[in-house]
Amino acid sequence: MSIVVQKFGGTSVATPERIAHVAQRIVNRKRAGDQVVAVVSAMGKTTDSLIELARSVNPNPPAREMDTLLSTGEMVSMYVVAMAVNALGEEAISLSGRQIGLVTDAAHGNASIREIHADRITKALSEGRIVIVAGFQGIDGAGDITTLGRGGSDTTAVAIAAGINADVCEIYTDVNGVYTADPRIVPLAQKIDVISYEEMLEMAAAGAGVLHKRCVEFARNFGVVIHCRSSFNDEPGTLVKKMSEDMEKAIVSGVAHDMSEARVTIHDLPDNTGIAANVFGAMADAHLAVDMIIQNSSREGCADISFTTPKADLARTREVIERVAHELGASNVEILKQVAKVSIVGAGMKVNSGVAAKMFRTLANAGISITMISTSDIRTSVVIPADRAEEAVRVLHTAFGLDGSAVFEETQLSAEELEAKAKKGR
């Protein structure tokens, strides 16, 4: 008997037909002899609708109240999925983040998990129940509801898997696994069967949207094996796990792109010691994320600092940076939204020279200009104009020999097909 945590995203539970399909999948796993915990996201676009509702009555809603409101989306999914499982003849119990004791810090909207008390989950499993958990949420030390930010339900699932020593954490999405590039942009992209935590972390940080960086990082820290697979078929997906050192590693495993960041440049800062610390200290104090950074001299005694940051936080970033720029005597702040980050990732880059040069040469041959560069042992990222991002991904994918022979086809089932499949499984 295995202990399995299954996570289903908003697309998977968007309609009653899809909920019935998810319930059948959960029940099938239980009847195959496994103990099952299912973590669910809010149905479809529920979270977006709740955000719109909040902002219709208050353009700047209090963070605490916002977290409480947004948590209800996952709770609705949790209740309905539990009901669907019970309708199939299996006993299910629904539990919120508070009820499973998922304790976080007090950073509303982007809380970090501090601990999880899994006693109630393990007790329910020992009683033969299926446990349905609301993802994305926890409680802080004061007992207030918090939300975990982007990818929060994935992180919830991995945290639970770590807390109950699950054999695997299955993350169900609308694609068959992790691909060498976004298959909607690169039709010849190939599914990756097994990928290391380190490569997946870099892919996630570079914009690959299948798994969020925080959930992969949590899995690596606690040795949780992730199986990323499709909600719409039973094909094996991609395993994310620790790789042995003696395994052969691909030079480049994938190409990722990210359209969610903007480039901010502060012009003509005094070129003094500690200037960068002042700028990015202010960003850190405001809990604002920074990705790529470049500092260079613009003229004698002055320097420019450029960095990328999420567009979602751009209003607050502008406020902080314009204040700091004024205090430090900079000439102006320039914000460019139409940029993209394109990255190549591969564990084999550590021991193979010339990979970055090949990337730059490929982009140059396509006439694509680079404005920023960032590297790690297994990743090279560049910032380019947003309107050239898809072309850049395709030419790099081909240049590094990642093109497969089969053209990607989306495998989502219609509502009617899902309903028929659910009935067949009863």
Image: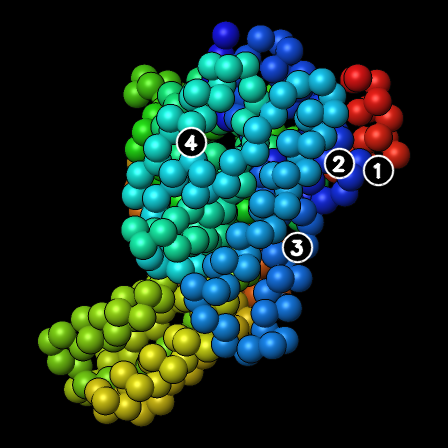
Secondary structure beneath dot 4 equals: helix
Circle 1 residue: 415
Label located before the other in sequence (1 or 4): 4
**Quadrant occupied by the C terminus:** top right
| Callout 1–callout 2 Cβ contact below 8 Å | yes
Task: Give whichever of 58, 282 is nearer the camera.
Answer: 58
Compared to residue 287, the image places residue 217 above or below, namely: above
Q: Earlier in the sequence, mark 3 or mark 2?
A: 2
Residue type highlighted by circle 2: Arg
Mark whose residue sits in front, 1 or 4:
4
The mark found on residue 46 in the picture is 3
Expressed as whole percent of the image width and height from the top left, the position of residue 173 reads 62, 37
User: Which SS class for mark 2?
Assistant: helix
Chain-order first, disc 1 or disc 2: 2
Q: Measure the alpha-carbon separation of dots 3 and 4.
A: 24 Å
- Indicate left or right for 171 with 105 as reference: right
Q: Residue flagged by tag 3: what amino acid is it?
A: Thr
How far apart are the two marked residues, 1 and 4, measured between alpha carbons?
A: 30 Å
**For mark 2, what is the residue?**
18
Of the image marks 1 and 3, the number of the one nearer the N terminus: 3
| Amino acid type assigned to the residue bearing label 4 in the image | Ile
